[in-house]
Image (cartoon, rainbow, N blue to C red):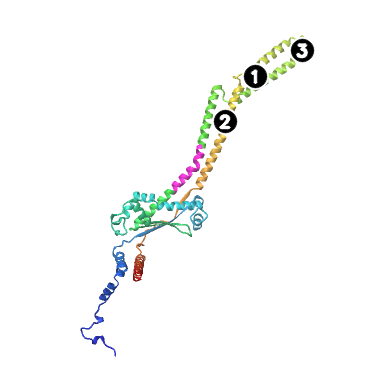
Amino acid sequence: MSTDVHALDDGQYRPEDVSVLTRLFNWGRDHFPFMICVAVPTFLTVLYLIFIATPQYVSEAHFVVRGRSAQSGISLSNILQSSGGGGGATSENTYVVQDYMQSRDAAELLIKQNHLLDVYSRPEADFLARYTLFGMGEKFEHFYKYYKRHIIVEQDSETSISILTVRTFRAQDSQQIARALLDAGENLVNEINRRQRENLIHATYQEVQSAETKLRDINQKLADYRNAVALIDPMRQSVPMVGYVTSLENMLTSTNMQLSQLQISAPNSPLIAAYQRQAAILSEQIKKSSGQITGSDESLVPKITGYEDLMLQRDIEQRVLASDVASLESAKQQANQQMIYVDEVAQPNIADWPEYPRDTVVLAVVFLSCLGLYVMGRLLIASARERNLR
C-alpha cells in the first residue's frame, strides 16, 4: 500500500516545496570545487564575451614574390610555376618577405609611420584585448609578442601564395596596416634588387672605369708624344719621304747607267762630267734624305717606334675596354633577369563583420581547460587519500 506524500502532516518534509534555485544552490554547495574550478570561470567567460569583449576585424591580403621571367602576365598557372617547386630563389625571397613582415623592423616601421601603438590602444578596446594590459608590458619586446599574435603571414602549401592577415579593433585600421605591410615588403624587394644589382655589376663597372682611365692616360701620352716629335702620324708622314728617297735612288740608277754607257761609247764626251756631277748630287741627296728616316735619334725610325708602341698600347686598352663594356652589359642583363617583384593576388579588404573573438571556440577552450584541471585535481586528491589510507 503506497503512501501519498500530500496526505502527510504539515510537519513532514515535502519535496515539491523545494524550489529549483534551492536545488541548484544545494547542488553547488555539494560540488563546490567543481563550481569554483569549472562553472565560475566559464560563467565569467560568457559575461566577458557578451558584455565586454571588443569586436576585432581582420583584413586579408594574398601576394606572391615572382621573378622577371614570370612578369609577362598574372595567371594561376604562372603563379603556381613561379611560386611552387620550380622557383628556388623566388621561394627564398618569398620567405624573406614573410619573415620581414613579422620582424621587429616592420613593427618599428609601423609604429613610426602608422601609429601602430595607438591602433592597438583604441579607447573602445576592452582591457583584455588591448595593448597594454593594465598599463603593464610597455617595453618594445612585450609589444612585439603582441604584434606577432595579431599580424600573421602564412604560405599556402598547395599554391605557395602568401597570406597576410591583420587583426585590429577597426576594419579601416586592419586594411591600412595590411596595405602598409605590403608596401614595406615591396620596398624590401626593391632594396634586395638594388643590392643584388650592385653586387653583380660593381666589379665589372670598376674594371670599365679602370680601363677608361688607362685609355685616357695613353691618349694623353700619345698627344704629348706628337707634340714632342712635331708629327701627327710619323708612320703616315714617313711614306712621302720614303717615296722621295726611292725616286732619287731610281734617278741615281738611271744616271749611273747612262754614265756607264757614255763612258764606253764616248770616253771623251763632255757629258760624262755632267752625269758624274748629277750622280754625286743625287747620292748626296739620298744620303741626306735617308738620314732623316734612319740613323740618328732625330730620324723618323725612333719616332715611328715610339709612336707604334703607344698605338699598340692604345689598341690593347681599347680592346680591354670593349670587353669590359660587354661584360658590364651582360651583368646588367643578368641583374635584370634576376629582379624580383611582389604581385598582389588579392588586395587588403575591409571586413564587413568582426571575425574575433570567436565566442564558441573561446568558451569551449575555457570550459575544457578548466574541466581538465578539475579532473586532474580530483584524481590527484583521490590518489593522495588512497596512499594515506594504506
Secondary structure found at label 2: helix
Mark 1–mark 3 Cα distance, whole angstroms, equals 29 Å
> Which residue matches tag 1?
290
Disc 3 marks a residue whose amino acid type is: Gln
Q: Is residue 198 magenta?
A: yes
Please state which amino acid type lies under the numbered disc 1: Ser
Q: Please provide percent x and percent y for residue 59.
A: 38, 58
Q: Residues within 10 Å of mark 3 (few under 14, many from 20)?
A: some
Taking the image as shown, residue 382 lies to the left or right of residue 291, namely left
Magenta-drawn segment: 189-206
> From what the image shows, is residue 145 above or below residue 21?
above
Foreground tag (2 vs 1): 2
Most common SS among magenta residues:
helix
Q: Secondary structure at mark 1?
A: helix
Disc 2: which residue: 313
* Residue drawn at x 40%, y 50% as measured from the top left: 184
305 left or right, relative to 198: right
Q: Tell me which label, 2 or 3, sits earlier in the chain.
A: 3
